[in-house]
Amino acid sequence: ALRRPRAVKVTQEDMLGAKYVLPIVLVVAFLVLAITPAFVATPPSSETLQVRGKGVLRGFLASVPEDASSQAEAAEPWLFSFLSLGAALGLLFSVVASTPARAITAEQFSQLTYSQVLGSGLANRCPTVNSNGTSVKVKKGDRMKNFCLEPKSFAVEAETDKGKEFVTTKLMTRQTYTLAFMEGAMDTNPITFSEEDGMDFAATTVQLPDGERVPFLFTCKQLLAKGEGSEFKPGFTWGGEFNVPSYRTGGFLDPKGRGMYLGYDQAVALPASQADGKEGQDELFKESNKVFDIGKGAIEMEVNKVNEELGEIGGVFVSKQPGDTDMGAKTPKTILLKGIFYGKIV
């Protein structure tokens, strides 16, 4: 005798599970079937080619055999679905797997090839220090190698409802604002670092909350940093002043063709307004009389990691410097930068 099949008991938990799984399945099906075909370009029909298309040779009308077009149409259903699925998976992977460049030591960085660094964001990163030992001693005749400054935040002094304050800004420059490969002579008692060479400037632009953009030359040219003692150890503080060259050089021409040693002396139609000698001409004179301003900046650093075996030091810094003056035409804004630094004593 045949037994009657048992009735399957559907619990409340099963119903709840199906309730949450069904929307996910519908969303995935929508992505694959509705959105992703936009990533795959369908081949043009033979009629379109015959009307619009001409071959590589002048006067040659492009034609498609009838059997070829029918074969392409027959292959469309499974081919486009396959490519659409691949495009969907690629898009999902690019969104999920995109992560910022992780920290990397100088030793690991030296083992990478150009192709491995290209497009990874590592070229804009300062190396990190693996703590090892308690201090790095500085002897007379030592040199600082691969000194690096990587800003993490940019603030500009601006007028607010509460008066002048440093306002957080939005970085408009791509990942090319880190100073790296700087070097210079070291001295001891007190520890003194004199910056001499390297990638010690980077043209940078930030944007204030009201939309105003502030260009400046992030730099530490001719830095003379000092700190009491003869060895770097966690908690050691040191700093000093540096020069800030003009954001523009003498060969730059403004929109009206004026420059320091190139271009016009003054803009067209301005001579008559400047010839009266009355007040209010100073602004026009500054715009026409281009100068190469050199300002002063200051930096303070604190060591928080040392590697005694490799002679590496790392820590944080705070730097304050003037912004762009438009070659003497306007008063520079004060820029406040905070970030991390790295250096190696050899």
Image (spheres, helix red, strand yellow):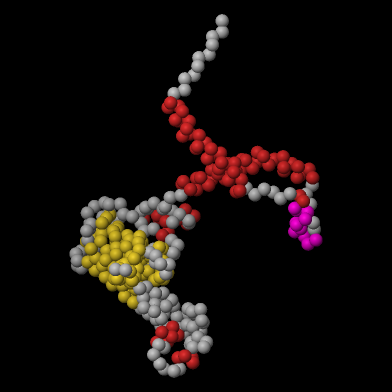
Q: Image point 49% across, 79% down: which residue?
A: 254
Quadrant including the N terminus? top right
Splitting the image into 4 quarters, where does residue 207 fall? bottom left
123 versus 78 height, above or below: below
303 versus 268 height, above or below: above
Q: How many marks?
A: 0
Q: In the visual, does 75 lie left or right of 50?
A: left
Q: Which residues are magenta?
A: 48-59
Residue 72 or 194: which is nearer the viewer?
72
The image position of residue 335, as x and y in percent, is: 34, 69
The image position of residue 32, as x and y in percent, is: 57, 41
Q: Image point 65% across, 41% down: which residue?
A: 79
Splitting the image into 4 quarters, where does residue 242 fall? bottom left
Q: Image point 33% across, 69% down: which residue?
A: 160
Residue 105 visible in the shown view = yes
Q: In the visual, does 327 lie left or right of 75?
A: left
Q: In the visual, does 251 lie left or right of 130?
A: right
Quadrant including the C terminus? bottom left
Residue 220 visible in the shown view = no
Residue 176 or 207: which is nearer the viewer?
207
Splitting the image into 4 quarters, where does residue 308 fall? bottom left
The image position of residue 274, as x and y in percent, is: 45, 91
56 versus 329 height, above or below: above
Confirm whether the magenta stretch covers residue 337: no
The image position of residue 92, as x and y in percent, is: 51, 45
Q: Residue furthest bottom?
A: 276
138 versus 268 height, above or below: above
Q: Residue furthest top?
A: 1
Residue 317 or 324: which is nearer the viewer?
324
Q: Image point 39% across, 58% down: which residue?
A: 125
